[in-house]
Image: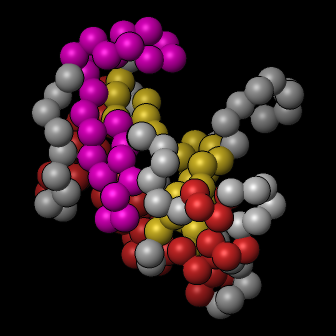
Amino acid sequence: MTDNTTRLDHVVLWVRDPLAAADFYEKAVGLEPLRVAEFTAGEASFPSVRLNEETIFDLAPLDLIPGMNMLPGAAGSAGHPVNHVCLSLPADAFDALRTRLEEGDVPVSGISHDSYGARGKAPRSFYFRDPDGNVFEARHYD
């Protein structure tokens, strides 16, 4: 990507066990893990998972909390001050995600219809939590 339009680069998720979180996001959600070997070797502070070519989720371990002092009050952000993160998927990937989650015994909400989002009304959406309690909405527009 070479243009400089505003985009979402990354979201930091607080997790108890970054390796378990990376495994969940790879196997249950279908995201590509990044920097897992480097984290395991002590060469990276946390692993990440790739949402798309432009956006990643950083899986920050709770032991980084004391160092989160770049902004007054940021250390207190560990926990879940964000209500949820919404993933927009093609319809087939939406269905595949729901199936993987259900097969992995991850609780999912019922299907909502016509929820409004960045691209208008989404025909279907549902919610789920990761093992650390972070809430995600999955939706599709096509």
* Residue 44 x %, y %: 71, 78
Q: Looking at the image, can residue 47 be seen?
A: no
Report the span colored magenta: 113-137
Q: Splitting the image into 4 quarters, where does residue 133 fall?
A: bottom left
Left or right of 6 in this view: 27: left
User: Does the magenta portion include 126?
Assistant: yes
Left or right of 40 in this view: 66: right
Q: Split into 4 quadrants, where in the image is the C terminus?
A: top left
* 17 shown above or below 22: below
Q: Split into 4 quadrants, where in the image is the N terminus?
A: top right
Question: Which colouring convention does the figure follow?
Answer: secondary structure
Write the residue at 77% across / 27% down. 6
Compare residues 18 and 142 and report the one nearer the observer.
Answer: 18
Q: Looking at the image, can residue 17 be seen?
A: yes
Compare residues 91 and 83 and report the one nearer the observer.
Answer: 83
* Residue 90 x %, y %: 38, 28
User: Does the magenta portion include 45?
Assistant: no
* Residue 4 x %, y %: 86, 28
Left or right of 21 in this view: 56: right
* 43 shown above or below 62: below
Mainly helix, strand or loop, the magenta region? strand
Q: Splitting the image into 4 quarters, where does residue 103 fall?
A: bottom left
